[in-house]
Amino acid sequence: MSVLAITGGTGFVGSHAITLALAAGHDVRALTRRPQPPRAGVTWIEGALDTPDALDALDRLVMGSDAVVHIAGVVNAPDRAGFAAGNIAGTQAMIDAATRAGVRRFVHVSSIAGREPLLSNYGWSKAESERVLAASGLDWVVVRPPAIYGPGDMEMRDLFRMAKRGVALLPPGGRASVIAADDVADLLIVLATHATPRLIIEPDDGRPGGWSHAEMVRAMGVAAGQHRVLPIALPKAILTLGAKLDGAFRGKGAKLTADRVGYLSHPDWVADPAKRPDPALWRPKVDTATGFAETAAWYRANGLL
């Protein structure tokens, strides 16, 4: 069994990754900003990628590890500098710590947004994080997940809410892939513990050609108990106005931001079949209809739907 150094372990995907790593018999060293309750098999390392004591914390995190699984990152920031600090500098800090410790295997969670770096600051920062990793000389693999959903996720909540109400306001027509958090986490653990060439991987739920926005929201509606959902595709100009309004009302909690408008308006976020993982190594296990139903159930149980 292996010792895995995990960043972002208290977040959505990271928490799933820790659970699956432990279930597979691995030991985990996980970075956390705040004290965590003891957990068998987990050594919590207090620190962060962007604090004055980051160097010491990251050295302690990777000490004695067999692989790094770098999940932590910034998905929302007020400007390019914020994305750069969280996604580029943070990745470089982990690369440096792994290099100092002699840890060769490095699994990096990027995003399918990194495929189109000119569309958003987020996508640009993820593409740059991939670039610094490729220049590191480490034994690396990059994972570019599409939209991730599952129990505990807050990014898809508004879509599920609209689907339940029967009317969903959507981006302009396009297609996208999705993947369950458990499937992403499973892939990360497999990659951390199995030798592969240096790769950029785009996993998905196994649905060829992905989902149209209308298909996706209708499937969410069924999961939420609503079998009649009217999808309304909004032009980019309306999304831009909506981003301004969302920012005015929800401030830092806004889900629709100016940076996300460029991303959302792109017509093709379908995982590249040529970049799917080797099926002998990994296949998705979560059927999306079942996964959406479990996600909707979690939202209901927590008063969110």
Image: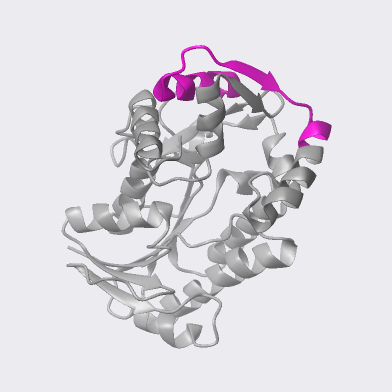
Residue 265 on image: x %, y %: 72, 34
The quarter holding residue 84 reads bottom right
Q: Nearer the viewer, residue 174 or 208?
A: 174
Residue 226 in the magenta stretch? The answer is yes
Percent coordinates x, y for residue 252 in the rendering: 66, 58
Relative depth, front residue between 258 and 208 = 258
Residue 145 visible in the current orientation: yes
- In the image, taking residue 218 as reference, residue 235 lies left or right, namely right
Q: Compared with residue 55, is residue 279 higher up or lower down, i.e. above or below?
A: above
Identity of the residue drawn at 31% across and 54% down? 189
Please say whether residue 259 is visible from this viewpoint.
no
Along the viewing direction, whichever of 52 and 255 lies nearer the viewer = 255
Left or right of 225? Residue 257 is: right
Locate the C terminus and report the quarter of the image it occupies. top left
Q: Quadrant of residue 267?
A: top right
Q: Which residues are magenta?
A: 210-239
Q: Is residue 160 left or right of residue 242?
A: left
**Residue at x 66% of width, y 62% of height:** 83
**x 18%, y 53%: residue:** 23
Q: Residue at x 45, y 68 (%)?
A: 138
Q: Position of residue 246 (x, y in %)?
A: 72, 45
Q: Is residue 28 above or below residue 232?
A: below
Q: Is residue 227 magenta?
A: yes
Rendering coords of residue 223 (x, y %): 40, 23
- Residue 85 location, quadrant: bottom right
When the figure is inspected, residue 112 is found, relative to residue 174, above or below; the finding is: below
